[in-house]
Image (cartoon, grey):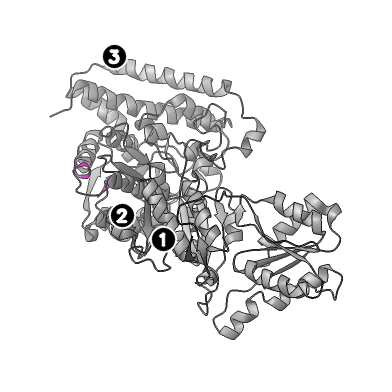
Amino acid sequence: MANAYFMQAMNQALRAAMEEDETVIVMGEDVDRGVFGVTRGLIDTFGANRIRKTPISEAVFVGGAVGAAAAGLRPFAHVMFSSFFYVAMDQVANQAARLRYMSGGQVELPIVYFAGTGPSGSAAAQHSENPHSILMHTAGLKVVMPSTPYDAKGLMIAAIRDPNPVVYLADLRLSRRREPIPGDPYEIPLGVADVKRQGKDVTVVALASLVHLAVDVADKLEADGISVEVVDPRSLVPFDWDTIVASVRKTGRLVVADPARRLCGLAAEVIAGVSERAWDSLRSRPQRVTWPDIPVPFSPVLEARLDVGADDLEQAIRATLGSPVAVGSE
Amino acid sequence: MLPDTDILLGLYRRMVRIRVFEEKVQELHRLGKLPGFVHVYVGEEAVAVGACSVLRDTDRITSTHRGHGHCIAKGADVAPMMAELFGRSDGYCRGKGGSMHIIDTSLGILGANGIVGGGIPMATGSGLADAVLGRDGVTVCFFGDGAANQGVLLEGLNLAAIWKLPVIYLCESNQYMEFTPTTDLTAGRIYRRGEPFGVASMEVDGNDVLEVRRVVGEAVDRARRGEGPSLIEAITYRFSGHSEGESAFVSAYRTEEEVESWKARDPVTCFRDLLQTEAGFTAAELDSIDAEEQEAVLKAVDFAEASPHPSPDEALDHVFAPAGG
């Protein structure tokens, strides 16, 4: 076990996957340097044949990954900022997510579409998206979004080994997070949530960097006698309903913290899904804390207004317990 | 010098197969038997057949919304093709793709594609796989003159050029982008768009199957030698509309005289004439090929109509491949 930063954990996983399978290749802009660190150093080991530095042409390398996968490679396509998925959306939604289905199951497309995601500090509206809900809605893409270095490594191994296109979103606010992780490769299966903190009064389903916020808020509320369970879905498609429903059946109360817009978002989906599955267990109205339905602004002051904060989350948790009721988090 | 007899007859047979298949498809569409959109390849047969005649089974193609001809030329069986057009369970895609999405990966057909230009990145990536793995395969990327104005063509040409990918970008200029003359909305000549990238660029008479075969064959040889991509513009014409049944929603956009002038250069009858005048085949020999292909297509229709509809719940299958599968 050695300390690894969030992106280093993914870098270890990618290196291990490339050593294990010579059909794994990397392509994307500046992948020889590795802007977030995920591809750093791989060029020295694996060379320019497998580490393919592309021009700034998202559509052709995102779509190229589809053809390459259909022809025998396992491409890791580095899309850089997740906002850039929109540049290549035809290739993501009409090609990568469709070819297996349209072919009646003839083809496997083992692709990882990696991107750094979310606000990273005044990157403004075109470099700060969290597009997971849109990608979840596409049908044909798996979507993962880890919250810790340990999970990041295990999920990356699983994503690369998976025979389907997997969108792997790395929350840029987790870049400085570090923890000891095993040096050898290990796999965390897609579709398995993780209970990050045990509790008995309220379930908080939190995603990516909000997992840590939720744990902090939960620790604070413990002093007031409120016991909060924090569940990290880790993988959004497939989604581990069993773990989340079991938690809600235990606590009877649900808050969803999603670092993304509210409309048609993950939080809405989780609340609907839990209501369908465990309505009889709910003891209060579920709450969601999300961004307002606005693009991500530039000014640090404005960006902070968008963010889900500790106060928002605490208020939502208290609302489920019958304390002063919050009407939305906007 | 003409190719060998077997090759000549093979070219003729494939062209006839496409023509007969497409004319049957038009008839079935008129009878209301085919669900959805249908775009036929009548008049353009020489391009697909000439190009695919120089490919190996292991080489790959990407196709277009007008893809029946490409699939047949690459060796697809007309029976599961027809079943797919009917949306039946014995179709190539078990009824999930239809006319615009016929795929047979075992024949290197990475798919017809409903998005104009949508196959260009895919073909480029297919070429990348050959380059990375050190194989001498090639990929032919069929696209139309309408797709030439999609940005992905520029992206694909650039990437294939810098990486010397074994990809032949084959533009079928059938003179119309949907219902608009291509020249109305297209600056310059399409094939010349490869020149600034250093991509071998040329045009060819797309109604002359032997010329297409020769020019694509040279491009394939270059690609296999590691000399990179080519851009070929095949000048041809679609005898039918953009989409079957289009007269119901679009007024006439080309003259009878224009259509007739191209029909005088029908790639199938011109090649048939050549086979008789220059290669010594008799009308009876060629008629028997015509009859065999007619028979095969009729059988394909029977096969399709006898094929069961997929069970409704099959709609839920094939979204994801099972892990470890």
Numbered disc total: 3
Q: Which residues are magenta?
A: B223-240
Frontmost residue, A76 versus B271: A76
Q: State the image quarter where residue B94 is shown.
A: top right
Label 1: element kind: helix
For the point 35% across and 36% down, the residue is: B43
Mark 2 closeness class: few <14, some 14–19, many ≥20 residues within 10 Å: some
| Residue A297 magenta | no
Q: Find residue A46 and name its label.
A: 2
Q: Nearer the viewer, mark 3 or mark 1?
A: 1
Question: Is the Cβ of the residue at disc 3 closer than 8 Å to that at disc 1?
Answer: no
Residues beneath discs 3 and 2 located on the same chain: no
Query: Chain for mark 1?
Result: A
Foreground tag (1 vs 2): 2
Residue placed under numbered mark 3 in the picture: B284
Query: Which type of secondary structure does the marked residue at label 3 adopt?
Result: helix
Which residue carries the number 1 mark? Answer: A58
Depth order, front residue of B2/B80: B80
Query: Local crowd at mark 3 within 10 Å, few (<14), some, or many (≥20)?
Result: few
Name the residue type under label 3: Ala
The reply to whether residue B63 is visible in this rendering is: no
Q: Position of residue B241 (x, y in %)?
A: 45, 42
Q: Amino acid at mark 1?
A: Glu
Estimate the x, y position of residue B100 in percent, counting from the top left. 48, 40
Which amino acid, by three-letter code, is at mark 2?
A: Phe
